[in-house]
Image (cartoon, rainbow, N blue to C red):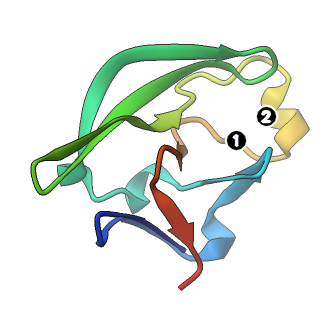
Amino acid sequence: MKAIWHNTIIAEAPKEDLIRIEGNWYFPPDALKKEFYVDSDHHTTCPWKGEASYFDVVVGGQTNEFGAWYYPEPKEGSVERVKKDFANYVAFWNGIEVSEV
């Protein structure tokens, strides 16, 4: 699986290493190409997963604000619901394409 933005692969891992939650693919932290990520102060809260942290994704001088998110400390009970620890796994949105190709 690949996460692609502006024709650049920003994350890549075998499908079996990813976690699918609520229609989103979450990549393991070591799948990220770190040079494209900048920590963001932005946070949101999911009622059952907890507080999400975000990265801005920067490719070729263009910034996708809050383009990637993760849960550093999933809420109690959420890991059991997903059946796998998804702490620090990263999902994408805002025009970032996740593909099996």
Identity of the residue furthest to the left in this view: 61
The Cα atoms of the two marked residues, 2 and 1, are separated by 5 Å
Q: Residue at x 45, y 55 (%)?
A: 96
Proximity of marks 2 and 1: CB atoms separated by less than 8 Å: yes
- Quadrant assignment for the N terminus: bottom right
Q: Provide the residue designation for mark 2.
A: 79
Seen in the picture, residue 89 relative to 3 is either above or below; the reply is above
> In the displayed structure, does residue 30 sit left or right of residue 23?
left
Q: Secondary structure at mark 1?
A: loop
Neighbour class for label 2 at 10 Å: few (<14), some, many (≥20)?
some
Please identify the quarter of the rendering in which residue 40 is found: top left
What amino acid is at disc 2? Answer: Val
Tell which of 40 and 17 is nearer to you. 40
> In the displayed structure, does residue 57 sit left or right of residue 18?
left
Please identify the quarter of the rendering in which residue 86 is found: top right
What amino acid is at disc 1? Answer: Asp
> In the displayed structure, does residue 96 sit left or right of residue 74?
left
Q: Provide the residue designation for mark 1.
A: 85
Seen in the picture, residue 90 relative to 56 is either above or below; the reply is below
Where residue 93 appears, as percent x and y from the top left, is 53, 46
Neighbour class for label 1 at 10 Å: few (<14), some, many (≥20)?
some
Please identify the quarter of the rendering in which residue 31 is found: bottom left
